[in-house]
Amino acid sequence: MSIGVDDDKNTLAPDDDGKALEKSWLRICSRLKGEVGEVEYHTWLTKIALGPVDGNEITLLLPTRFLRDWVRSQYGDRLSELWNQEVSSIRHVELQVARPGDPAAPVITSEVAAVSAPTPAPLSPGLPADADDIGRLENKNDIAATLDTRFSFDNFVVGKPNEFAYACARRVAEKPSSVGFNPLFLYGGVGLGKTHLMHAIGAELLQRGNVSVAYMSAEKFMYRFIAAIRSQSTMEFKEQLRSVDVLMIDDLQFLIGKDNTQEEFFHTFNALVDAGRQIIVSADKSPSDLSGLEDRLRTRLGCGMVADIHATTFELRISILEAKAAASGVIVPAKVLEFLAHKITTNVRELEGALNRLIAHANLFGRPVTLEATQDVLHDILKAHDRRVTIEEIQKKVSEHWNIRLTDMSSARRARAVARPRQVAMYLAKQLTSRSLPEIGRKFGNRDHTTVMHAVARVAELMERDAAFAEDVELMRRMLEN
Ligand SMILES: Nc1ncnc2c1ncn2[C@@H]1O[C@H](COP(=O)(O)OP(=O)(O)OP(=O)(O)O)[C@@H](O)[C@H]1O
């Protein structure tokens, strides 16, 4: 969940009392302001506050979850780059929700920083902002990480592609360490809900009480391990890890090629499983496909329950969007949800990000969400997902289907046998690409954008009235999308 960059330039002095960081933060704020402009900066970025630094990670705090998610999706990478440029030892920016009275509570916000010289901030590396979401652990701070309370079983939308993984996760949350479910190995493509399920398991276990849970990414595991070696406290680190009831390691593929960390993980893994503790691991591939991991580790990882999260289906994407739209309280028309589910197909995180942007826009400007507004607000995202269908392909397929000449897509002929397929092609160009109306018009013999608008409206109207025609157009769309 943290954002990282790689580069080595300036480093943070070990005895830095926070002043250098404050100065860096001031410079970052002023650069950001210059880059995004006054309005954006004041809308989204003035509420960020400096949190603690822990090794190569700096925490930035935001007052609400909504702002945290927004800043993460829109500015996360840039913040990370800017921090790394300022202090090369900082490779990760962790965005968290601040809590009042938190020991690591923010003192320097970007708002303060942007207008006046700050007073020094106490940058004590205390508990993370969501400290009480952490499982009960001896020496809590060292190995525990926050569980993200956004991710629960209740808000995980279940469909065919993920029902098995979901059932396994629930089972482990109810009865950890059952034979056959230890380890639980969750795998699947990027952004399909592995982390969500792990956090949900953690939250459920903690709610049931009396267990200690540790969750961390494999990357964090490695950094902690290296830090322990540096500070000559590996024994302590091992003991902490081996004292938990449930250990969850996310994105295990990160350990490929990191032989020493793998070795350490292998021993921890064995010690925990042998002691009857539960291990939950996620990765982007199945244990047998994780070439680059040691064989003995792969074999052990595959010994328990291996559950695959498959790519989403259109139906699942619609259900996820419906659930998230309902939770936001903003009315998002079914047409818009379908449009998004058609356009963004591979990654739920991106799908969610697109919806969040629409919702933020609607909230900010008090305007209803419409298909037109969606195409406008999400122009950049849609463009990135557009590569599959070009207007030329649409014209070719439609001409073949209605048996007209390809040149008639641009000709001035107005006979219905030609004009109707041309209108359908314009309609599909509007639906399946992110080209603007004037751009589409140009591709159809330099027609005016109002002609395209008329064509789009006419085809939509005909589809409402004529089921056979609607079926034809839908068939075209599916053929073009595949
Ligand atoms: N079935 C689902 N129901 C609700 N939300 C989902 C579902 N699947 C994924 N998400 C959401 O999509 C986003 C990405 O999910 P998550 O971080 O769990 O993916 P991941 O598989 O761990 O990705 P990565 O491979 O990048 O680690 C999260 O905000 C999560 O809540």
Image (spheres, grey):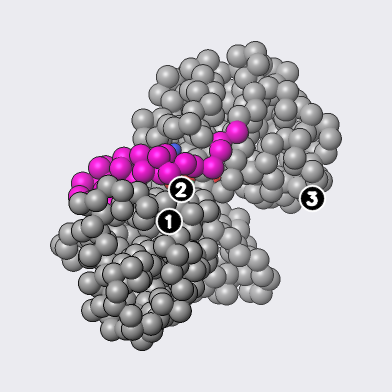
Measured Cα–Cα span from mark 3 to mark 1: 46 Å
Which tag is nearer the camera, tag 2 or tag 1? 1
Say left or right for 299 vs 450: right
The quarter of the picture where residue 214 lies is top right
Q: In x, y percent, where is residue 302?
A: 72, 28
> Does residue 5 appear to the left or right of 321 in the view shown?
right
| First along the sequence among labels 3 and 1 | 3
Q: Taking 360 as reference, is 152 above or below it?
A: above
Q: Tell me which numbered mark, 3 or 2, is placed earlier along the sequence.
A: 3
Image marks 3 and 2: residues in contact by CB distance under 8 Å: no
The residues bearing labels 2 and 1 have C-alpha atoms spaced at a distance of: 26 Å
Numbered badge on residue 257 = 3
Mark 2 = which residue? 348
Which numbered disc covers residue 375? none
Q: Which mark is residue 476?
A: 1
Q: What range of the chain is rendered magenta?
A: 308-335
Could you classify mark 1 by the number of other residues whose Cα lies within 10 Å: few (under 14), some (14-19), or many (20 or more)?
some
